[in-house]
Amino acid sequence: MRQLARSALRPYVCPSCQRGVLAGRRRFASKADNVPEVYDVVCVGGGPAGLGLLAALRASPVTSKLKVALVESQDLSKGRTWSLEPRLYSNRVSSLTPSSVAFLERIGAWQHVDSSRTQPYHEMQVWDGETGSRITFDWTVETSPFEDPRIVATMTENANLVRALLTRIFSLGEEGVSIFSNTTVSSIENGTDYADGPDLSAWPVLSLSPSASAASQPPSRIAARLLIGADGINSPVRTFAGIATDGWDYNRHGIVATLSLSEPATQPFPAGLKTAYQRFLPALGGPIALLPLPNNHATLVWSTTVENAAYLKSLPPNAFIAMVNAAFRLSGTDLRYMLRLEPTARSSTADISQHEDELNWRLQHTPQPSHIPPPVTAVQDRSVASFPLRFRHTSTYISPRVALVGDAAHVVHPLAGQGLNLGLGDVASLSGTIEYAVRHGMDIGDILSLERYPHERYAVNAKVGAVCDLLHKLYNVPGQGPVTWARSLGLDLIDKVPFAKGFLMRQAN
Ligand SMILES: Cc1cc2nc3c(=O)[nH]c(=O)nc-3n(C[C@H](O)[C@H](O)[C@H](O)COP(=O)(O)OP(=O)(O)OC[C@H]3O[C@@H](n4cnc5c(N)ncnc54)[C@H](O)[C@@H]3O)c2cc1C
């Protein structure tokens, strides 16, 4: 894996290279080109999905002998040495379901996750900010009083997971694996039938460019028996394969932040068992979720309109904290009023900002339910950020010699915390599919060898994406009307029928 060390100094994605990828679809290489280095598997993208796939292939005795390469335009050496002080947390955190954790354990990666920075939670309180109707997700519906309550999900910083996956990959030895870090795929084309060499005319051939400063280094070319696109929402591999993608932008942003709480986010359970909270706010364009991290910390995911997101990001810390506390406690009318206040900090003459003042006054006139989170007391410096929310699903996950995984294949609304879990599900299925093909002496790039993968994953991903989309749409209808009535009845009903609730929870696991 010398390439990682050699190219680790170039953390820049060249925009012209990206254009080259899009324009270079299915072009033919000139006969004069040198024969590219041939790999069994080339994975483009070293996010959690791509690294998960590489770790899975390397960990299996059946596929560990394959010659594999991973190309990532960012600097993976930074991912390998990532570290933060114990009291600080990254703002990119995912709730990993028990099946995702079980898969990561199976490939030997979870053992490398720093568990002192992860936080399992056993219960999730979800309620409608408009009607107050509520559902509690916890495994007490399925477990006996004598069993330990089961985990709903485990909050894990994406960087903690990426570091663990890299550690696992490196622990499995260097033979047969090339990691091209800080390297951008600048074009992908079909290969050539070399007169004195292999016939690569039906194989994808990738041109690689250093991402930044070492522009003098000639781009290398590599060919793939099987090319895997783990390259995110704008997947160059998907474009090369001509796989169509459909979807829409929600015109919403997800605000994330790392928060400190006045006390641990525990609810009716005994000490140590943590709770996650989500309140749907139809008047503001989406739900606000507060998910527990260790040591009285929590991560925020607040889906809201682009205008609200810009406003919230412009607030000084004390006003931002007041808005988050208000969003779990006040009515839609109160919140809309507070979103129009001047975004001012505490002044020298007043020790309280306008937002805090409004919150305190309005709380006196608003009855509080018992299932709200503890008050937020601080927001970690520079942790407030926002991401556009989108829905995408490709028409298929495979084409000859190509397979797509993770966000390259599907992007879902984050309200159910499922995006990365779906990606890890893809990785488990595709690595199993490749393993089966190798075991039975099949060509791993042949479409017949790959067919099992979309068969296992397409409908599952489509269902989860559709449910998230439906929930987003249902909870974006403010006011009193049939939709509001139906959704409140639905939540109350599901909450009171253990069988229905257990079914929903199993779907999310
Ligand atoms: C606000 C928010 C909250 C979320 N919360 C959750 C949650 O709680 N649980 C959950 O499961 N999911 C969650 N998600 C979704 C989750 O973050 C994503 O699904 C996941 O990170 C996607 O991983 P990936 O590896 O498929 O893609 P990415 O992380 O996008 O990785 C793609 C990689 O490909 C590389 N790349 C792209 N083009 C090239 C090229 N030409 N050459 C070389 N490399 C290239 C990129 O640099 C990148 O590293 C959330 C998303 C958002 C926005």
Image: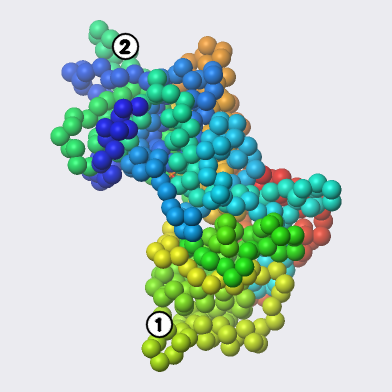
Q: Is residue 469 visible?
A: no
The numbered disc on residue 198 is 2
> Where is residue 253 shown, x and y percent of the image?
46, 62
Do tag 1 and tag 2 residues touch (Cβ < 8 Å)?
A: no
**Dot 1, crowdedness within 10 Å: few (<14), some or many (≥20)?**
some
Q: Which residue is mark 1?
A: 344
As drawn, is 71 to the left or to the right of 267? Answer: left
Q: Is residue 267 above or below residue 235?
A: below
The percent position of residue 314, horizontal first and vertical second, equals: 39, 73
Residue depicted at 73% across the width and 48% down the height: 150
Q: Which residue in the rendered view is the most extreme toward the right?
A: 145
Outermost residue, front side:
86
* Any part of residue 141 in sight: yes
> Could you tell me the amino acid type at mark 2?
Pro
**Residue closer to the observer: 60 or 422:** 60
Callout 2 secondary element: loop
Residue 142: give x, y in percent of width and height. 80, 48
The quarter of the picture where the C terminus appears is top right
* Residue 4 placement: quadrant: top left
- Residue found at the very far bottom of the displayed protein: 349
Which is closer to the viewer, label 1 or label 2? 1
**Residue 280 bears which disc, if any?**
none
Instruction: Determine whether, in the image, residue 398 is placed left or right of residue 33.
Output: right
For image coordinates 46% across by 17% down, the residue present is: 65
